[in-house]
Image (cartoon, rainbow, N blue to C red):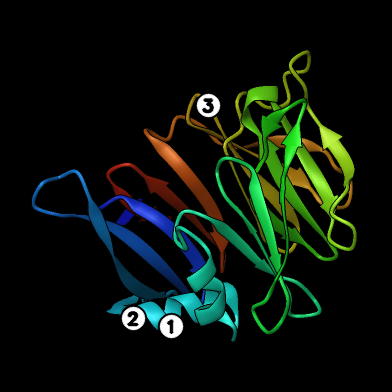
Amino acid sequence: MEKITNKEIIDVVRFSKDKLVFAEKNPLADNLQYNANYYIVNFATGEKEVVTKKAYMLKKFGSAYEKICDKISDYIQCEAMILSDKSVLIVFPNGQAGLFDAQGELLWIKDFRYNNKPVFSLAQDGEYFWCVCKEENCVMRYNADNFTVDIRIGSNDNSSFNAPHFASSDEDYVYICCNENKVRKIDKKTLIVSDVETNIPSLQRFYRFKGYSIFCCSDGLYFE
């Protein structure tokens, strides 16, 4: 694996067909607070370059990013998805979700929960999106039209997923980061679950992009 940065990654957003933008944690002098540095990685050229916070926010939240970010408490820790009508769905790690219209006006706030446990992550799948419920060992597909659960895979009595904590997706699969530093994948067409990667130390997030596996670990960002 090649290492892109030795700092903890707190967000990754697709920037273009060849580029990802990521936010890395930059601890301040007291080590109790931090700010973020933003970079673009071009997988066509292998180059890494600094990018502005505004460019990151535009790609994550769309053209109404200024209004949206004025209304939310933490624009980095949340997951965001731009829907087909240009509205923006946001979910925080505690399961609180918000929907903003294309102009950045808040339409609603609700909690995404399963068995009263928080649901997190947004892995896009056409007119659907996938989330994880770590405490219930399950992964769910939501309908983006009405935000109801369409499919659930796994449970506390089923070993498909062990404490899943993050989901991402590409054209064919949904990738789930689980305990034991493992990544599993769900085939979007067949819903078959299988292993992708195992024994990745301190794994926090996983992505597939342009044929590369991208690992966000506590000690930095890697790809292979």
Q: Quadrant of residue 79?
A: bottom right
Residue 197's x, y, as percent? Answer: 54, 38
C-alpha distance separating marks 1 and 3: 33 Å
Q: Is residue 11 left or right of residue 218?
A: right
Q: According to the image, label 2 marks what residue? A: 51
Asked which secondary structure carries label 2, the reply is: loop
> Which of these two is toward me, 126 or 136?
136
Q: Is residue 124 left or right of residue 121?
A: right
Quarter of the image with the C terminus in it: bottom left
Q: Which sits earlier in the primary sequence, circle 1 or circle 3?
A: 1
Marks 1 and 3 in Cβ contact (< 8 Å) = no
| Residue in the picture at 73% in, 27% down | 116
Amino acid on which disc 2 is placed: Val
Residue 193's x, y, as percent? Answer: 76, 36
Residue 101's x, y, as percent? Answer: 73, 76
Q: According to the image, label 1 marks what residue? A: 55
